């Protein structure tokens, strides 16, 4: 998460809304361990990684929906057996769960 702080601080100083996605659980094989984080600002800029690239696009979409008030903070899951997860490229055989929330300052 430390790798995100410079970007988050810059966005915060500019008054730009930011959402944070964190890996909270994995089952089986997962690309990143719990605690991995990614920040997304309302302009779609991204810092960090939660999956090494395989589900980042879907996470950005979820984060933007939360920032625009179209969705509530929540846990989302991606796994090989899920049609949606396969569609976004999570093929490592495991399941990852992410909590996505807006940062409040």
Image (tube, rainbow, N blue to C red):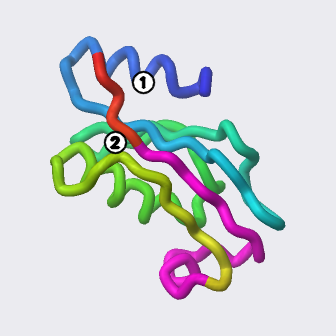
Q: What residue range appears in magenta? A: 82-100
- Label 2 close to label 1 by CB (< 8 Å): yes
Q: Residue at x 38, y 54 (%)?
A: 60
Q: Which residue is mark 2?
A: 45
**Residue closest to the far right:** 28
Q: Which residue is mark 1?
A: 7
Q: Is residue 64 left or right of residue 81?
A: left
Q: Residue at x 30, y 23 (%)?
A: 104
Question: Residue 29 sits in which quadrant?
Answer: bottom right
Q: Count numbered badges in the picture.
A: 2
Q: Where is residue 49 drawn, in percent x and y?
A: 58, 46
Residue 64 lies, with reference to residue 96, above or below; the image says above
User: How would you rate the neighbour count of disc 2 (Cα within 10 Å): few for under 14, some for 14-19, many for 20 or more?
Assistant: few
Q: Is residue 45 magenta?
A: no
Q: Is residue 5 left or right of residue 103?
A: right
Q: Residue at x 59, y 66 (%)?
A: 54
Is disc 1 placed on a helix, strand or loop? helix
């Amino acid at each position: 998460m430390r790798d995100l702080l410079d970007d988050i601080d810059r966005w915060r100083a500019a008054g730009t809304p930011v959402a944070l996605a964190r890996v909270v659980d994995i089952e089986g094989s997962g690309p990143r361990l719990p605690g991995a984080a990614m920040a997304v600002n309302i302009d779609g800029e991204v810092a960090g990684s939660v999956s090494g690239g395989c589900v980042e696009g879907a996470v950005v979409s979820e984060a933007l929906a939360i920032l625009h008030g179209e969705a509530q903070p929540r846990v989302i899951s991606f796994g090989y057996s899920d049609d949606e997860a396969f569609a976004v490229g999570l093929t490592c055989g495991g399941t990852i769960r992410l909590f996505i929330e807006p940062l409040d300052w």
